[in-house]
Amino acid sequence: MNALAETTLKGIRVNAEPGTSPVRIDGQETIPALLRARCRENGDATAHREKDLGIWQAYSWTDYLNHVRLIGMGLRALGLGRGDVISILSEDNREWMYCDMAAQCMGAISSGVYTTDSASQLAYLVNDSQTKFLFLENEEQLDKFLEVEDQMPSLVKVIIFDPEGLHDFDNDKCIFLSDLYELGRQNDDEALFNAEIDAVTKDSIAVLIYTSGTTGNPKGVMLTQENIVAGMETSLYGLPFEKRAEQLCFLPLCHILERIVSLYTPLIVSSTVNFAESPETVFDNLREVSPHGFVAVPRVWEKIYSRVLVMAQESTLLGRWAFAQAIKAGEARAKYTMENEPVPSGVEMRYKIWDFLVLANLRRLLGMDRIQRGLTGAAPISPELLKWYHAIGVPLFEGWGMSETAGVGTINLPEANKTGTIGQPVPGTQLRIAPDGEIQVRGLNVFKGYLNKPEKTAEAFTEDGWMRTGDVGRVDNQGYVTITGRMKDIIITAGGKNITPAEIESRLKFSHYISDAVVIGDRRKYLSCLVMIDQENVEKFAQDHKVPFGDFRSLCRAREVLDLIQKEVDAVNKEFAQVEQIKKFRLIDVLLTAEDEELTATMKLKRSTVEKRHKALIDDMY
Amino acid sequence: MSTLLEVRNLETFYGPIMAIRGVSLKVEKGQVVTVLGANGAGKTTLLKTISGIMDPEKGQVIFEGEEIQGFEPHQVVRRGIVQVPEGREVFPLLTVEENLALGAYTRKDRAQIARDRDMVFSYFPILAERRAQEAGTLSGGQQQMLAIGRGLMASPKIMLLDEPSLGLSPLLTQEIFDILRRLNKDEGVTMMLVEQNAAVALDLADWGYVMELGRIVMADTAERLSASEDIQSFYLGHANEGSRGERRWKKRKTWR
């Protein structure tokens, strides 16, 4: 092993030069090895918490490794070999994490399935990955499996986490997690387990991340141990976590963002992960945990913002006045802090007073009183929203990354922040703009290829080995990157003009009333768009403006609501050239959920599906 | 058809708790409109706000073109809105006839009142049989009939019925709903019907609303509501047993 120069960052030993191989974190090159080292080192300290019957229960690092070992040895006894794939279909919980780690410890590959996926999608993922062992959260997910049981020949065993309601259930292929633990206990052999961990190399495939695939079938992104460890190394520079920090895990673990943040980052910094009870209780759990860092998608930040506004509006006259004053004071200060400029003492003083009177309480109420830094990614966020969070004393920064880059690719930092950009490339990642405007990256965190799709893999890389991100953008002279669109989504109007719809769409999405939009216009005379309204905010608007409505459909038909969206569209139109004007729009009058095919698991509209399913609405505009 | 009753953006509170969070709906003349919803959805609060027992924080109740929100209950009754309360609230120590007479206390025309009482007796012959009996000694179904009969005695333009099927046997429920149907068809009584028993309510109604947590989540003709998948699995108890035949979990509601 060549001896690379090392440095210590936040108390952790890493290569002095980020992005050089082999990447090592405190001397460990793989996740299993790092997990073992951390569990031994932290012993009885709390590794994670999960609610049981409404009470937070703590699990130590020792418990963590024990559970992982038992599952690993159990799977081995059932025939799991190196390079085999396991799939996990569950909401976030500690079992999810144990299984992911156990598979990696045994040299196998772990893949996540969204709980919102249908039975046929499950079958596709299992078959594409040739999954041998499938983990299911509960009865509900089990029924998905049973529906397509005969279509998945690769499966050896199915393991169910929660036996609730399944006491009479009998299927040769299915066992419960407790059975697997028991099997692990019977075959427990620490030396063997350690040998398995030691056999994992930096080039072993660690995980498969299926990209949500806005077009076609999902593609399995293969990430090696080194990809992820390199991603973790950059996290160390970019993510707001430190030793013993509290985190909240609530976004789907199948998604690279939460996977890196909640499963792998804690292995670097020994932070404590708290699993949210369910997607519905996130805001309560946030208040209970009060994390030190919070990473979320724009939708979540937007929801919290809307809640605060509603609370403020429903408070007393004095309360409303004080809130407005506090936000003003906060925004005055944010102007300086967001640019990393010194804050004039008068502005700082005024902020301190309002912080003491209002903002500190607000943060406590939200569960954000300990947050040192918030991070948003996976979709564009409105600059006004970023500013608002800075104003209330929650410094929120935007980053960018994709499954193919094992998480973070570029990031804004407190000391290097430019609002409206996705920040500078993280240490260890190189980024360039191709002549056609495409953003291309290179680094140890860049993936090895798509599973079973050599032609897609070939398409993803340039001849000189850079990865095509598919995003179009620019870099300014200080190195800040701005994304303007997607390569594939370029619209060519009947007039022959090239238009990148993503830029217009993200401007539309910045409106509080618009949750997502799809701009249409390929081979058409002019641009139009389909809008998915933000139910809560538009309902609030209707209620405040005495617009009668019944269900969602009638809300979407209300004249005043259409006028409201028209106003938002007009405002966006002003920022774009003549050919990029949106001439007409229609609202999607069905309240879409993550189970609907039109939405990705992160609640983004899928262009191709939307165009197909709502063809009538589109044709109506031309 | 013309709109008899319209509710717009109604918000009603119990102390700090917002029980109705912006409800808008319409009842056309001669129609039966049903409001479905689970416990705590805000159905009864909605009726109470319409009939003046509770005051809304925001929004309007428009009856025959006049805004009546915040009116006292007796003023609302005089305009022709009568609520038949939940749980058969009859006066137990008064006789059937006295109960019926109380229903007509806003009216002066004795001959018309007598005619209406005969009409009530023709629809509910059992009440005629027991006209001198104390209401408290009637059976549950008979008390419900009496409560409806008492409501009819006000010669209402619209009846607000709060769970007429509550605590009644299926047979009695059917009987009462048959009578409600005849009252609607023959006498042209407009009704707004709050029910948990979605099957009978949708069978009777022309139009339905589904309330959840103080909001309307679905509005459609009763026929289309009955055909909706969510209504079938959450209100009509059509279970999809799944491949194991003992499915416990419910899919998420989408209200389409």
Image: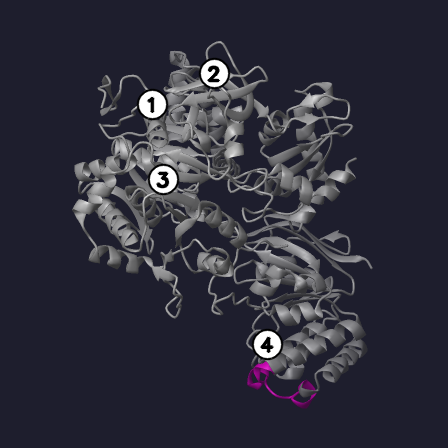
Question: Which amino acid lies under the numbered mark 1 shown in the image of this protein?
Answer: Tyr
Return the chain for callout 1: A
Give the CA separation, mark 3 to mark 2. 29 Å
Nearest to viewer (mark 1 / mark 3): 1
Residue denoted by label 3: A248
Q: Is residue B134 magenta?
A: yes
The kind of residue tagged 4 is Val
Q: Amino acid at mark 3?
A: Leu
Q: Quadrant of the N terminus of chain B?
A: bottom right
The secondary structure type at the circle numbered 4 is: loop
In the depicted view, which residue is nearer to us: A280 or A229?
A229
Examine the rendered structure and indicate whether residue B180 appears above or below residue A319.
Answer: below
Q: Which residues are magenta?
A: B127-141
Query: Disc 2 on helix, strand or loop?
Result: loop
Identify whether B65 is placed above or below A242: below
The residue that mark 4 highlights is B90
Disc 1 to disc 3, how far (Cα)?
Answer: 20 Å
Which of A459/B12 is in front? A459
Of the residues under marks 1 and 2, which one precedes in the sequence? 1
Closest to the camera, between mark 4 and mark 3, is: 3
Return the residue nearer the eye: A452 or B13.
A452
